[in-house]
């Protein structure tokens, strides 16, 4: 949410206090004034565990970040966190002292914790919004992109912001026009299509006038994120690492992939069998769908998914992105796509070393060739193994433009860490239960040869 990093500790302390208060109060609701010692003692022993898991879940779902969040998103993330927390708490009580928590206590505590945390976090969000007040925005970018960019910006920052000026970022802009617009607004949003000279001028104006600057980054600007400051004699320099995962991390990542995928295949075997039966009953054809994708270094492999479309769906159309309400998607397939369960067989690809749990999504050769010719730097995403999920999947949607997905993929490669992988995996659980994230391309959005048309193309 909009809290700064300095506010993390007090916010987290209140979160922990409320979740433990909710759990403790649930014992009074269940037992009245006299709580059995055998029931309350396991809870007391688990307070550190409950507190730590809550903070991890809230951190994983981005509730300690500075990003603007809608109230529905906050409440949804809290609800999912509480469900996971209580399931893990019930599991831990088995190791502490059998199943000492009555089921009714866990159910009651879930409702109480959800209510307390939702009220507190929504009040906090409202307080931050009041603190921000009404703010005005200047948007600067080239023709053809500004309508889309302005619409996306409006949905991102909410209704308390007004886009007051929309300027073309050509070099022909009068400096006085830029200065006048920036001086009259609180925030400047700058598109990456603007020439470098104009970017530098706008940044100078924002620094001079103390204005907040929002920038859609280019590959160059992503590479400059988290650079290492060094010196050469008395000259300050930046050391920029290549766009790849360091060898020391690659081994850890591979071990993590093998362990999780092997355990996952064993645990999920009953679910695999159930889904296989449902797919066969729903429509004729194979259970699995294998498709050639492009992996590390441009190598090709056969990606495995549960079949979600009618057999031979692209026999007439050729390679195209699925549309919203696509008639080729089966009834069971629609459910599998919404929940992302169709991706589970890719655990086999991970065991074979063709994929990773987290990484850029593997594309088909047709689209790789197309995007590489249209989007500068697209080939860089082939420098790491593709993944079942990735930063572009949790931050974007199915119909997010490939150029925007590339920005997320390159940011992931530039800032990789095991903690980032864990956060993306947890975020995937939340996204998997959000229907909008799995929808196909809207039929109102222009699509050319299977790709959402970029402005000006």
Image (cartoon, rainbow, N blue to C red):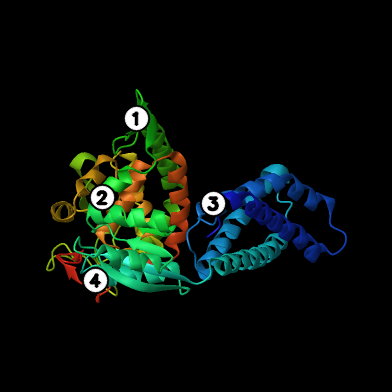
Q: SS for tag 4? A: loop
Q: In this image, 23 relative to 432: left or right? A: right
Proximity of marks 4 and 3: CB atoms separated by less than 8 Å: no
Residue 394 visible, this angle: no
Q: SS for tag 1? A: helix
Q: SS for tag 3? A: helix
Q: Earlier in the sequence, mark 1 or mark 2?
A: 1
Count of marks placed on residues? 4
Residue at 46% x, 75% y is: 159
Proximity of marks 2 and 4: CB atoms separated by less than 8 Å: no
- Give above or below for 164 relative to 407: below
Q: Pinpoint residue 13: horizontal percent, then vertical percent.
A: 67, 51
Per the rendering, the mark at residue 303 is 2
Residue identifier under label 4: 328
Q: Earlier in the sequence, mark 4 or mark 3?
A: 3
Q: Earlier in the sequence, mark 1 or mark 3?
A: 3
Q: Nearer the viewer, residue 225 or 264?
A: 225
Per the rendering, the mark at residue 59 is 3
**How many neighbours does mark 2 have within 10 angstroms: few (below 14), some (14-19), or many (20 or more)?**
many
- Which residue is situated farthest in the right direction here? 34
Proximity of marks 2 and 3: CB atoms separated by less than 8 Å: no
Per the rendering, the mark at residue 247 is 1
Name the quarter where the C terminus is drawn.
bottom left
- Which residue is situated farthest in the bottom direction here? 444
- Marks 1 and 3 sit apart, C-alpha to C-alpha, by 27 Å
Q: Nearer the viewer, residue 64 or 444?
A: 64
Of badges 4 and 3, the one in the foreground is: 3
């Amino acid at each position: 949410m909009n809290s700064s990093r300095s506010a993390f500790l007090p916010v987290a302390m209140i979160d922990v206090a409320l979740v433990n208060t909710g759990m403790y109060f649930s014992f009074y609701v269940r037992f009245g004034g006299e709580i059995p010692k055998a029931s309350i003692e396991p809870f007391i022993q688990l307070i550190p565990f409950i507190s730590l898991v809550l903070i991890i879940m809230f951190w994983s779902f981005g509730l300690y970040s500075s990003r603007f969040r809608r109230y529905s998103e906050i409440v949804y993330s809290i609800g999912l966190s509480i469900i996971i927390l209580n399931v893990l708490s019930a599991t831990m009580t088995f190791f502490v002292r059998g199943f000492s928590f009555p089921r009714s206590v866990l159910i009651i505590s879930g409702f109480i914790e959800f209510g307390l945390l939702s009220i507190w976090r929504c009040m906090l969000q409202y307080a931050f919004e009041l603190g921000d007040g009404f703010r005005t925005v200047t948007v600067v970018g080239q023709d053809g992109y500004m309508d889309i960019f302005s619409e996306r910006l409006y949905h991102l920052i909410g209704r308390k912001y007004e886009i007051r000026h929309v300027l073309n970022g050509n070099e022909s802009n009068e400096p006085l026009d830029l200065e006048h617009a920036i001086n009259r607004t609180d925030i400047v949003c700058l598109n990456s299509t603007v020439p470098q000279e104009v970017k530098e001028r706008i940044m100078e104006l924002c620094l001079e006038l103390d204005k907040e600057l929002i920038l859609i980054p280019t590959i160059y600007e992503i590479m400059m994120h988290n650079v290492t400051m060094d010196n050469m004699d008395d000259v300050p320099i930046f050391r920029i690492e290549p766009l790849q995962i360091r060898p020391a991390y690659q081994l850890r990542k591979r071990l993590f992939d093998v362990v999780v995928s092997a355990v996952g295949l064993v645990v999920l075997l009953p679910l695999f069998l159930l889904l296989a039966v449902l797919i066969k009953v729903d429509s004729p054809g194979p259970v699995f769908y294998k498709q050639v994708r492009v992996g590390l270094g441009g190598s090709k492999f056969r990606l495995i998914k549960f079949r979600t479309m009618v057999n031979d769906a692209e026999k007439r159309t050729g390679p195209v992105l699925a549309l919203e309400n696509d008639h080729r998607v089966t009834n069971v397939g629609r459910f599998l796509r919404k929940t992302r369960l169709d991706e589970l067989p890719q655990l086999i690809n991970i065991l074979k070393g063709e994929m990773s749990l987290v990484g850029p999504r593997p594309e088909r050769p047709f689209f790789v060739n197309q995007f590489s010719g249209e989007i500068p730097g697209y080939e860089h995403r082939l420098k790491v193994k593709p993944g079942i999920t990735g930063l572009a999947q949790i931050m974007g949607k199915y119909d997010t433009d490939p150029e925007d997905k590339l920005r997320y993929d390159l940011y992931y490669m530039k800032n990789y860490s095991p903690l980032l992988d864990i956060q993306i995996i947890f975020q995937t659980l939340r996204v998997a239960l959000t229907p909008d994230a799995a929808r196909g391309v809207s039929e109102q959005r222009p699509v050319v040869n299977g790709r959402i048309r970029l402005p000006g193309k």
